[in-house]
Structure formats: C-alpha cells, structure tokens
Amino acid sequence: MKKERELYREFLKSKDLKFTKPRLIIMEAVFENHEHFNVDDLYEQIRKKHKNVSRATIYRTVPLLVESGLIKQSLRCESKDIYEHTYGHENHLHFICVNCGKIIESGFNDVAELINQLAEKKKFKISEYNLGARGLCENCQKNKEQS
Amino acid sequence: MKKERELYREFLKSKDLKFTKPRLIIMEAVFENHEHFNVDDLYEQIRKKHKNVSRATIYRTVPLLVESGLIKQSLRCESKDIYEHTYGHENHLHFICVNCGKIIESGFNDVAELINQLAEKKKFKISEYNLGARGLCENCQKNKEQS
DNA sequence: CACTTTAATGAGAATGAATCTCAACTGCAC
DNA sequence: GTGCAGTTGAGATTCATTCTCATTAAAGTG
C-alpha cells in the first residue's frame, strides 16, 4: 500500500494533477480489499467511511489509476466495467461464470509472449490486453445438472 | 450463406422458435458484410432496405444468433458490444486501436489449447472466450509522433 | 500565514446503449 | 381458413457512465 501510494503521488505530480483527499480515499479503497471491483461496489465500500465522496469523483479517478498503471480495466461482468490490480500482480486469465458472476483466475506464462510476437508482426503497439473466458464454474455446473 | 441459413432454421426449430421475416432479414444482414459489427451499425444497414425492422428486434435477435453458435460476442469497442462471425472462422486475436477504433485480426494456434488445459484444471466449463489487446495501430502511431 | 489561481469536487441532470412493455401482428399446426 | 402462442414495432424505461456548474480546496508565492 505504501508503494502504491508513492507511485500514485508521483504519477499525479508528473501530470500536474493535485494529490487531493478524495483521490487518496479512492486509491486506498481500491487497494484495501479486492483485486477485482466495479465502480458501484467501490462506491458502496467508500460510502461506509466517507459519506461525501461522490460517484462522479470515483468515475473520474478510476481512469487515473488505470493511466498510472496501478490497475487496469478487465473484461466486463454483468454489464459493468470491472477493474483489477496490476501493481505486483502477474498477468492472468479470467474464467467468468455466466451464472453466478464468480471470477476464477489462472496464471499463464506463454500467452503474453505469443501476443507480443503477433503484435510486432502487425506493427501494433499494445498498451493493454485481456484474456477471458465465459462459461460455468464447478458449482453452477453441478446445480444445472440437478435441475 | 445457404448453410448459415439452414443452421439457423434448425436452431430455431430445435428451440420451438418461429422462423420469422425479421429474424431472417437480420441474419442475412449479419452475414452480408462485416465480420465485426455492433447493433447500431447493423440497424443502419438493415434500415436501408427494410424501414420497419426495429432496434428492439435486432437486440432480441442477436443473442439468438449467439446462442446458435453462428456469431459470438467479442470485446467491446467505444462502449458498444461488438459481435463477430464464428461459423467458418477460426479463433483469432483482436488488436483494437484505441485512437481510431480499427480492429486488426491475427490468427493463433496454441492459445486455445492452453486455455482449455487451464480450464480443465479449474474444472471450469468454457462456453466462449476472448483474447484482445488495446493499443495503437500503425497509422495512429505515426500520427501521434508527428503531433 | 494569507492570498491567488486554477484544478477538483459533489450533487444532480443528461446521455446513450440495452431492455422492457404492450397492443397489434404473424407463423404454423390443425 | 382458423386459432393461438410466440413475435414484432414503437416508444417508454432502465441503468451505467458522463457532463455541468456552482462551490471548495490544493499548492505555489510573497
């Protein structure tokens, strides 16, 4: 958390943006818990402690966190944008259960390299990539069988 | 197109759904041109020939085409859901230019297998997966350098 | 520390993609 | 052809996200 905070502060400074209270509160909330979140959940979480941080500010701050490289946008889930931590986390693959919304992660090594090779061939400059699969998690498979 | 149509008809029958004129018009429009589309573009395209097909019907029909396996949902682009053909097309990777919206495709062989292996480990049943990268296409890289 | 400038914030309004409603319509089985 | 359940069109509605604007607060300067 300490390091994230310093990186964030430096990022803001480099962009001539102010290190404000709401921006700090939101950043701390992001790194407090989950590795995946959407703005709505984040808003609820922040509201428990800070009644006066508005949705708009969260929507304005999350893209800053993305630009700073601390988090990245992930696949959508239930028609909401979701985000995940990147700082200190390896690239990974998401298995998203279409029934219960559960997100299962799985590491991989080779895919990143493959993608980079292909991008180079197409002269495409990657800023971010996503790899995700939708389907049913173990539990939901069992439940479906029964019914 | 013939085969798509037959597959679609069979699919509808198997689900006790009717093979209606709007469902045919929409399906034909989908396979007429693009391999990538969003509902808005599809609506405009259909409107040129058929003034009385409504947006709602397109929004209702596209999920049927997905369920039938003829198309699948792809990564979002410019805050709209986009879809791509699957029938007769191999799996591929998308490079999406965040500047001009261009979608560049690239084939791959190994990723699918890797994903399936990982899914099996996690006992996850995949119905569909996506692999996409955002960044800048060749043109937009050049333009950015100049300005 | 007070001052000044300029960006950032909160609250609610606005936007826009996607979904829903419901009366009118149409496949299709008989 | 008849009947009926599933479909449709049009517009209303929803809901995530973005915008507006008056108010507030960083943070450099003297």
Image: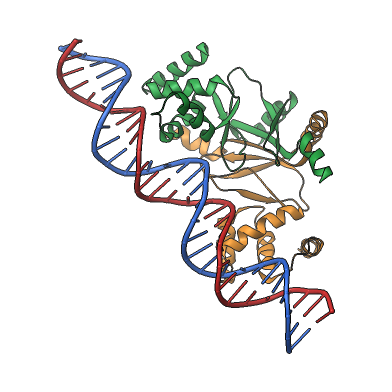
Chain colours: A green, B orange, C red, D blue
* Left or right of residue B10: residue B33: left
Viewer-nearest residue: C21 or B99:
C21
* Left or right of residue B7: residue B147: left
Residue B89 position in % (x across, y down): 76, 49
Residue B91 position in % (x across, y down): 75, 43
| Vertical order, A86 against B97 (above or below) | above
Residue A52 position in % (x across, y down): 38, 29
Residue D14 position in % (x across, y down): 51, 50
Q: Quadrant of the N terminus of chain B?
A: bottom right
Q: Quadrant of the C terminus of chain B?
A: top left
Viewer-nearest residue: A106 or B108:
A106
Q: Residue at x 69, y 60 (%)?
A: B31
Q: Can the viewer see residue A69?
A: no
Question: Could you say which quadrant of the image residue B146 lies in?
Answer: top left
| Numbered-mark total | 0
Viewer-nearest residue: A48 or B23:
A48
Q: Can the viewer see residue B56?
A: yes
| Vertical order, B49 against A125 (above or below) | below
Question: Could you say which quadrant of the image residue A34 lies in?
Answer: top right
